[in-house]
Amino acid sequence: MRFSIAAAFMATTVLAAPQAAQLEPGRFSCGTPDPTAEQLAIAQEFLKEEAYAIANGTLAKRAVTYVDTYFHVVASSTAASDGYISDSLLTAQFNALNAAYAPHQIQFVLKGTDKTVNSNWARDGAGYELTMKKALRKGTYKALNIYFLKDMGSNLGYCYFPTSVTANSNNFWKDGCTVLHTTVPGGTLTNYNKGHTVTHEVGHWLGLYHTFQGGCTGAGDSVADTPAQASASSGCPVGRDSCPSQAGADPIRNYMDYSYDTCYDNFTPGQAARINSFWTTYRASCSAC
Ligand SMILES: [Ca+2]
Ligand SMILES: [Zn+2]
């Protein structure tokens, strides 16, 4: 049932271009496009099935999902300030990512790291995204590719949601996450340098929307256990309740909000179920890619 409903949407699903940042410098800013109406509808279908899987215990009994992961460092010179991230910081980044997802039976397996000096590729928005990814992307549609760039404009990162792709299509090549190099643990971006920009962006790659998606009314992020939220948080505003007429305070510590790295500490069981739904439907099953 789930697969057939999702399949009905597949033909017209097209990856949206990354969004230009709209927030001021010093705030978290994610360039992942808002989900389309089709993507929101798919999430609503998943939500119905997930409620059963959570209630009857089958979700908790699922096997660990292992995600082959490739890190690509793309710098404008071999200087750290130009984006050439050291091996020790990359290790710290990988460990931060895995620690965040470990409670939810997701484990990343680092299969390779490469470092490239190319001042065109190192600047997102310069028009080389597809060229760079065609040169560097590794693995199948089940493999996570993260590109750490020197310059992201005013975004800290963006990814593409899971969708239906065919081998060698642009949707396949573009799949992955692009992240500002200074956000890795030990990086220079104050308040956002514990590695959780990657955690947040990978959440999108796994199918999660922002906790503030849709605001206070309607389906929101289509996850039942993330309270409705009017807008993105900033910093760590304990007690924030931006939808006072809805149950629950804002999920400011959820990785899919916009809080400081030190504020984040969780994904919910509902989000873990959503990750499992998207993984099963779009990534694990993509034998042609
Ligand atoms: Ca919600
Ligand atoms: Zn985001």
Image (cartoon, grey):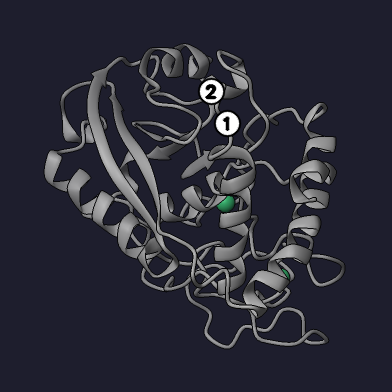
Does the rendering let one see residue 155?
A: no
Residue drawn at x 36%, y 31% is: 149
Marks 1 and 2: CB-CB under 8 Å?
A: yes
Q: Position of residue 194 (x, y in %)?
A: 30, 60
Q: Position of residue 81 (x, y in %)?
A: 22, 35
- Which amino acid type is shown beneath numbered disc 2? Cys
Label 1, label 2: how many angstroms apart (C-alpha)?
6 Å
Q: Give the quadrant of residue 248.
A: bottom right
Residue drawn at x 51%, y 69% is: 267
Q: Nearer the viewer, residue 110 or 78?
A: 110
- Which amino acid type is shown beneath numbered disc 1? Cys
Q: Residues within 10 Å of mark 2 (few under 14, many from 20)?
A: some
Q: Give the quadrant of residue 277.
A: bottom right
Residue drawn at x 79%, y 84% is: 246
The residue tagged with tag 1: helix, strand or loop? Answer: loop
Residue drawn at x 20%, y 37% is: 85
Q: Residues within 10 Å of mark 1 (few under 14, many from 20)?
A: some
Q: Which mark is residue 286?
A: 1
Does the rendering let one see residue 94?
A: yes
Does the beta carbon at disc 2 come under 8 Å from ligand 2?
A: no
The residue tagged with tag 2: helix, strand or loop? Answer: loop
Q: Is residue 179 left or right of residue 5?
A: left
Q: Give the quadrant of residue 32.
A: top right
Q: Nearer the viewer, residue 171 or 276?
A: 276
Q: How many marks?
A: 2
Q: Nearer the viewer, residue 46 or 251?
A: 46
Q: Name the residue carrying label 2.
A: 289
Q: Is residue 143 left or right of residue 206?
A: left
Q: Which mark is residue 6?
A: none
